[in-house]
Image (cartoon, grey):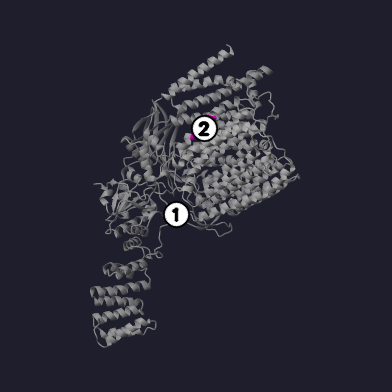
Amino acid sequence: MLAVLGSAGMLAGLVGAALLVRRGIAAARSDRPANLEGAVRVLVAGAVVAMGAMVLALLTDDFSLVYTANHHAIATPFPFDVATAWAALEGSIVLWGLVLTGYTWLVFHLHRRSPDRLGAAALAVMGGVAIFFFGLMITVANPFEVCVQAADIGCLESSPWPFAAVEAPANGPGPNPLLQNHFMMAVHPPILYLGYVGMTVPFAYAIGALSLGVPGPEWLRRSHRATLVAWSFLTLGIVLGAWWAYEVLSWGGYWAWDPVENASLMPWLVATAFLHSGIVQQRRGMLQAWNFILVISTFSLTILGTFLTRSGTINSVHSFTQSAIGPALLGFLVLTLVGSFVLFSTRSDLMATSPRLESLVSREGTFLVNNLLLSVYAFIVLIGTTYPLILEAFTGTQVGVGEPFFNRLAVPVSFLLLLVIGFGPVTPWRTTEKGLIWRRTRTSAVAALGAGLLIAILVSRNGWVVLAVTLGTFVIATLLGLLWEQARKRSMRTGDSHSRSLQRVVTGDGAFWGGQLSHAGVVLVAIGIAFAGNLGEHAETDLSPGETTTFQGYTVTYESPFRKTTPGKTIVGARLTVTRGDDVVGIVEPSWNYFGAQSVVGTPDVLHRPGGDLYFTLRDLPDEQGAIPIAFDTSPMIWVLWLGGLVAVTGGVVAMAARRRERRPAVEAQTVDV
Amino acid sequence: MSERLRNVVTIGLLVVMATVLVVLVATSPTDTDRVQAIGERIKCPVCQGESIANSPSPMARDMMGLVAERVADGGSDEAIVDELLASYSGAVLLDPPARGWTLLLWIAPLVALGAGAGVILWWRRHPVEPAPVTASDEVTGRRRLVPLLVLVGAFAGIVVVAGFFLQERAGPATGAADLAGEELDDVSNETMEAVIAANLDDPEVDGMRLALAERYYQAGDYRSAFPHYLEVAESDDATESQAVAALIRLGWMAWDGNAEVDAAVGLFDQALAIDAGSATARYLKAQVLWCGAAAYEQAAGLFEAVLSDPELPEESRDLVEADLAAVNSGASCT
Amino acid sequence: MNRGIRWVGYGIALAAVVFAVVLASRFGTDPGLVDSPLLGQPAPMFELPPLEGGETISLGDLEGEIVVVNFFASWCLQCRNEHADLTSTADAFADQGVTLVQIAYQESPPASLQYLEVAGRSPSALYLADPGSRTAIAYGVFGIPETFFIDEEGTVVGKIIGESDALTLGATIDAIKRGESPGQNVTGDTQQAPDG
C-alpha cells in the first residue's frame, strides 16, 4: 500500500513539475496572468506524499518496500529509523525532491501579482530541475520498489511495479553502523540539503532573467534573501558535519579534505563569492557577467558534488553505493553547464552595462579581490579533488591528492581572505580619499600586533597561531572601530546617546552588520583551526584496569571495562576517570560499538574543557590481560571553531531578516554608507 | 598631538611590534617530528583517505612503526617515501610531488590567480560602453538559442547513454571458473588435481575427474588414473555414462596392469549391470576372458552379442568379426 | 568586452563537455583499484618466523622455486573461502617446484593457528607470522586476500586480488611454468580490517 502511495506521490511530483514548466514558460512569454498555483500544489503534494510514505514505511517496519528491506532493521531505534529515509541513495533523492519543492513553493509565494514574467520564468526553471529529480526517482533511483523475492535478511529481487506480488523479508540489515552512532544523522543531511538545494533559487532567477533578456539587478534583488537562507543552511550544514566527524567518527579530525566534504565546500565558496558580488551589482550595477557565472557555477557545483558522492567514480568515506544514477547526474550536469553558459553567451551583449571601476582601492575593488580569492580557492579544491580521476583517465597513472596539498594552498588563501575581510568594510565605495583607510586601520593594526605579541609571549610562538590571532584581531578591531566611528557620527548629528546610536546604526543597516557578524564568525573559525591544528598534543599508552597515567597535567585512571547492550548494538568500552589535582574533571567512556549483522565501530569520548578538548580513543580491543591501548589527544580552543561557525550562520540569518534598505541608485547614502 | 606626529608614532610602533613578532616566531623552536611529517604524506592503504599518521587503524600504526625505524636508522625523508611508493605505487601519496604530471597541480592555482588578477587589471583599463539593445538582437538571440539548446540536450543524452554502456561493463573480472564449462586443454594435471581436491562437494567434479584420469590413462600412468576412476565409479553424483566409462577403464587397467582376470571381469559386469547394452564393456570382457581365462565359449558368446548390436560402427564390426573367428577357431589371443 | 564575455561563456561550456567526457570514461572502473608496482620487479625479501615460532624462513631459502605468497587472516571471509583451494593447490604442486607461503596479516599467531587447525594445512606449505606487518607493507598489501606469484628467478610475475580458486591458482602457476607473466588479476573484493 505504501509503495502505491509513494509511487503515486512521485508521479504527482513529476506531473506537477511538468505542468509548472509548461505554464511557467507560457506565463513568462506573455503578459497574461498565469495560474501556476495548481501546478505548484501538485508538485508539493507529490513530494510530501512520497516522503511521508517512506517515513511511514520505516516507522511501521514495512519490509515489503525494498528500501526498508535493505536499509532498515526492526531493532533500529528512533530517530535513526526516520533518518534511514535519507541514509541511502534513493531516499536521499526523495529528500532532495522534498526540499526542492519547498523552495519552489517559497518562490511561488514571492512571485508577484501577475504579470510577473521573471517570477514565472524562475518557477519554470525550478520545475525543470524538479522534473530531473523526480525523473531520477521514478527511473534509476526508485525508493518504492517492492520486494518480490526475499532473503532471510533483506531483499533479493525487486520490482518497480507497486502492484506486484510481494514477498517481504522478516527483517533487514539496518543502516550502516557509522550512521547509527549519533543523533546528528537525523539532523545534518536535511540541513545540508536545505543549503544545497536552496542554491537552485538564485540559479532559477538568473536563468529566467537570461532567457527573458532582462539582466540588471532585479533577479538578484528578488533572489537575494533566498540565497542568504541557502547560504546560512549550507554553512550550518558544513559546520555540523565537521562537528559530527570530530565528536563521533574517531578521526579526531573535523575536516579531512575528503572528496565529499570538498563537494560541499566548493559550492559554499562560490556561493559566498556570489553573495558578495551580488551586493556590488545591486549597489553599483557592475559585475553582472561575473554574477551570472558565479550563480551558474554554484548550482552546477551542487550537482557535481551530488555526482561525485553517488557515482562511484571517486573513493570516499562518504560514498553511497554505486548505481546507475551516475550517468544520469552527469548528463544533467552537462545539460546545466552547457545550456546555461551557451545561454549566457548568446546574451553577452546585455552584460556590459557596467559603470566604470573608478579605482581598485574601493569597496568594489575589495569585492573583486574577494571574488578572485574565493574563486581561486574553489578552483584549487576542484582540481585537487578531480585531478586523480582526470590523470588516470588520460595516462593511467595513479596519484593521490590529500591533506598536505590542500592545506598548503588553502591556508595562504585563507589568510589573504582574512586580510581582505579586514580592509573591505572600511573602504568606501567608488573612491577613497587619501589616508582614510590608514586612519581607520592604524589603531586596529597596533591592537592586532599587540594581540599577536601577547599570544607569542604567553601561549605559543607557532607562526600560524600568531598570524591567525593577529589578523583576526585586526579584522575585529577594525570592525569595532568602524562601528564606534559611525555611532559617534550619528550621535553628533542626532544628539542621541551613544548606546542608542550604536543600536540605531546596527539596525539601520542589518544586512551590512549581519555580514560583519559572519565575518567575525569566520575569524573565530580561523583562530579555532589555527589553535587546534597546531597546538594539539598526542600520546598513546597501554592501560590495564586500575592503572593510572598522566597526560598534559591530567591524571587518567582506567577504572574498569564495561559492556552495555541496547537493541541494535552492543557497546564494549573502558571507563576512565580524569582528574586534575584533587578535582575529578570527568569520566570518559571510549568504546567499540558492535552492530548486529554488520560490524564494529570505534567511538571516542571527548571531555570538553575551556582550554580545549581532551579526546580519548581506544586503539584496539583489550588483550588477554585486559590491557587496552588508549590514545589521548588535545584540541586546544576548538570550541572557538564551533562558536565561530554558529556566529557565521547567525550573521547570515541577521542579514536575511534585515529590513530592506532603500535603494538609492549609486548615490552615497547619508546615514550608514562609508 | 598633531596628525603628523600621531602617524609617525603609530608607524614606528607598528614597525617595532612587527619586527619583534617576526623574530619571536622565526626563532620559535620548531618541533620537527620527522616521523609525523613523513606519516602525514602517506595515505593509509586500508582506510579511506586518512594519512598513516592520523589513522587509528593497526595497519597505519605498523606503517608508522616502519617509518620510525627508518628514520632512526638515518634514512632520508625521500628515501623512506620512495620505499613505500615502490610497494604501493603513487596512489598512496597524499602530497603530489612537484614533478611529472602532478607539477600541473602545483602550477595551476598560481596560473589561475595570475589570470584572474590580469583580467581585473585589464578590465579596469578597458571598460566598455553598454551596447544599445535593439529588438533585432533579442529576436536573433532567441533564434540562435533553440538549435543550440537542442544540440546541448542531444549531447547530454549521448553522455548519459555512453555512461550506461560503460557501466554495463563494470565489475572486476571474476576468476571463479565454471568447472564444467572451462577450456581445460591448457591446464596442467596438477591444476586439475588441485581443482578436484578443492571441490569435492561439487557434483560437477566427476566430469573433471574423468578428464584427468583419461589423461593419465592415455599416458599409461595407471597408478594416477586409478583413484580417480574409482571415485567416479563409487560417486553418487556421477551420471550413468560416467560411471560406466570409469568402470570400463578400471576393468581394463585391472587386466592390463595387474593381470587380474576376476577383478576385471567383475568390473565389466558392474558396468553391464548399469548399461546392459554397452558394447565396449562386452567386448573388453570378452577379450579378458579369451586372453586371460581361455574361456572361448563365453568369449564367443560375448562377441556375438556385440555383433548383434545394429548400431555398431562398420570398422569395429570387422575387428569383432575377426576376433570371433579367431576365438571360434580356438586360437589364443595375441 | 562583449565578445570576450561571449568566448568565456562558450569556453566554459566546452570545458564542461570535456570534463564530463573524462568523468564518464571512469564509469565502470574501480577507483580504489591500484596497479601493483611490484609486477616485473624482484620480489621483496622477507625473513619471517613460522606461526608456531622457531627459526625464521627467508625468501632466499626458496630460491629456484615458484613461490606463491598469500596474505590471509581468520577474520577475512574471502580468505576462508579460498583456503581449501590454496591447500589443494599446494598439495597438487608439491613435487613440481612450487611452494605456497601463507603469511598471517594483522592477526596474532595464536589466532591464526587456531584457525588453521580447523581450516587445514598442506604439509608442503609454509605458514608464517608477520610481526609489525613489515612484509605486508613491503608487498604493498591493500587488503586481503592478496596472492603474489614469484617465478624461479625471484621476480613477481603475477598477483591475484580477491578470492581465488584452484583453477585460477593452478592456471596461473601453469602459465608461469610456461614462462609467461600472468600479471594482475582482480577476482573480487578484499577485506581491509576485521570490522569490514
Q: Quadrant of residue A522?
A: top right
Disc 1 chain ID: B
- State which region is magenta: A409-417
Instruction: From the viewer's side, name the closer residue of A367 and A251.
Output: A367
- Residue beneath label 2, please? A413
Q: At numbered mark 1, what does the secondary structure look like: helix, strand or loop?
A: loop
Q: Where does residue B75 sit, x and y in percent of width and height?
A: 33, 36
- Distance in Å between CA atoms under marks 2 and 1: 42 Å
Residue lying at the far top of the rendered structure: B1
Q: Where does residue A339 sit, x and y in percent of width and height?
A: 62, 46
Q: Is residue C16 visible?
A: yes
Q: Which mark is residue B172?
A: 1
Q: Is residue A620 visible?
A: no
Q: Quadrant of residue C177?
A: bottom left
Q: Is residue A669 above or below residue C114?
A: above
Asked whether A59 falls inside the magenta stretch, the response is no
Disc 2 chain ID: A
Q: Is residue A162 above or below residue A218?
A: below
Q: Is residue A449 above or below residue B100?
A: above
- Left or right: A169 as drawn, with respect to A40: left
Kindly identify the residue that appears in the image at 27 percent across and 73 percent down: B253
Kind of residue sitting beneath label 2:
Val
Q: Nearer the viewer, mark 2 or mark 1?
A: 2
